[in-house]
Amino acid sequence: MTASQSKKAPYHFGEKLKLVRERKGYTLKVVAQRAGVSESLVSQIERNRVSPAIDTLLSLAEVLDINLEFLFEEYRKKHPVEIIHADERRSVDEDGVRYEETARPNSDDGSHTMESYLITVPPHSQTHKGSYGHIGRETGFVLSGQGELHYEKNVYPIKAGDGISFSAGAPHVLVNNGDEDLKAIWTVTPSQRFNKQD
């Protein structure tokens, strides 16, 4: 393979497509017809001569009944870390409570998406979104200030240095009953807030 060809298909979908096709006993012609593409294109993709358009790749994956996680495994190994720099953080304000993103949800994680943010609750205020509960779990670490976690009918006093973990299915709110901002790092799975932000 030449350098230019390697640039065109850096993740080598071809070998995986060919391996599955041969294991299933499909010919190039059968796969091409079912995917609605030419036989020569499938051949070139299998030999990593061209990088397929995403709709073509999805069609081939459907015909061969291939899990996309399997196809993109190599890409994920090459991009294992994501950094959100301080000046790039997305943020959202909800009724005076500020959420600043520190870990971004990854749609590839499916139902296991996770988000994390720095939450700032002003004095004599509280969060609202969890007041009816939702699927998943939440964990938090209080950086500064003090307050209460209201969980179902229970009230848990919290202060700087405390760690918190709970099932998010029950109603819950974070209340700042002090005179300074309550700041905490909060992690939620599956993601609830920033997966819907731009």
Image (cartoon, rainbow, N blue to C red):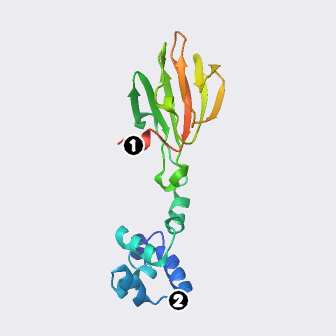
- Kind of element beneath mark 2: loop
In which quadrant is the C terminus drawn? top left
Residue appearing at x 53%, y 45% in the figure: 190
Task: Give the quadrant of residue 146.
Answer: top right
User: In this view, which residue lies farthest toward the top?
Assistant: 179
Label disc, if present, on residue 43 of the rendered structure: none
For mark 1, give the secondary structure. Answer: helix
On the rendered image, what quadrant is the N terminus found in? Answer: bottom left
Q: Is residue 99 above or below residue 115?
A: above
Q: Is residue 29 rendered to the left or right of residue 160? A: left
| Residue at image mark 2 | 25
Residue 1 visible? The answer is no
Circle count:
2
Residue name at image x 48 percent, y 50 percent: 106
Q: What amino acid does circle 2 point to?
A: Gly
Query: Where is residue 117 shown, x and y percent of the image?
Result: 50, 34
